[in-house]
Amino acid sequence: MVPDDKAPTGSVRSVSHIGIAVRSIDSTLGFYEGVLGLSCEHMEEVKSQQVRTAFLPIGGTRVELLEATSPQSPIARFIDKRGEGIHHLAFDVDHVARALERAKAQGLRLIDEVPRLGARGCLIGFLHPDSCHGVLVEFVEDRPPKKVSG
């Protein structure tokens, strides 16, 4: 058991990434890689969220490009309503469940009552933009990679 003074708090540690909704990652990468000089470090499809993602590190954070894989996905609906652009702001926390609990205790509206699995194997949880001054906020908890026994 972790002593109380060392227990995870759900506190924000840093900006994890800025999520940007795009119609096509392939056509958008040219701007981020060619014009801005960033490099894609990771690409994956998150089937449960009907999205394809690409992560481009910059400084201590990342840009996450989000492309819908279904017309019913949240990203497709976002683009239909608002067009391409900033979708969410994600913060690294030491414990997503506690961060969500703390937000709920302060009266914030949650999209996720419990953490779920997101891209790069991280645990994530979203706060509703109505409670965050119009910004969709994501909490991200990096999980250590699983050890492969050999």
Image: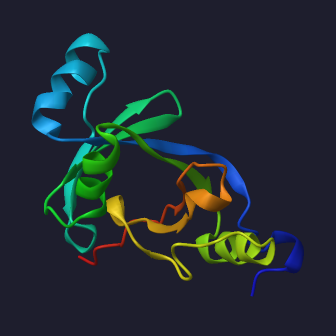
Task: Name the spot of residue 80 as percent of width and height, x first.
Answer: 25, 49
Q: Quadrant of the C terminus?
A: bottom left
**Vertical placement of 66 versus 128: above or below?**
above
Left or right side of 110 for 53: left
Residue that lies at the very extreme toward the bottom in this rendered image: 1
Closest to the observer: 69 or 123?
Answer: 69
Q: Residue at x 60, y 70 (%)?
A: 96
Closest to the observer: 19 or 140?
Answer: 19
Closest to the observer: 90 or 83?
Answer: 83
**Vertical placement of 141 versus 102: above or below?**
above
Q: Quadrant of the N terminus?
A: bottom right
Quarter of the image holding residue 10? bottom right
Task: Name the spot of residue 74 as percent of width and height, x first.
Answer: 31, 62
Quarter of the image holding residue 62? top left
Task: Name the spot of residue 28 as percent of width and height, x first.
Answer: 19, 29
Left or right side of 137 for 133: right
**Vertical placement of 127 versus 134: above or below?**
below
Q: Residue at x 34, y 59 (%)?
A: 120
The way the protein has been coloured in the rendering is rainbow
Left or right side of 110 for 37: left
Closest to the observer: 148 or 13?
Answer: 13
Q: Residue at x 28, y 74 (%)?
A: 148
Task: Name the spot of residue 106 as percent of width and height, x first.
Answer: 81, 71
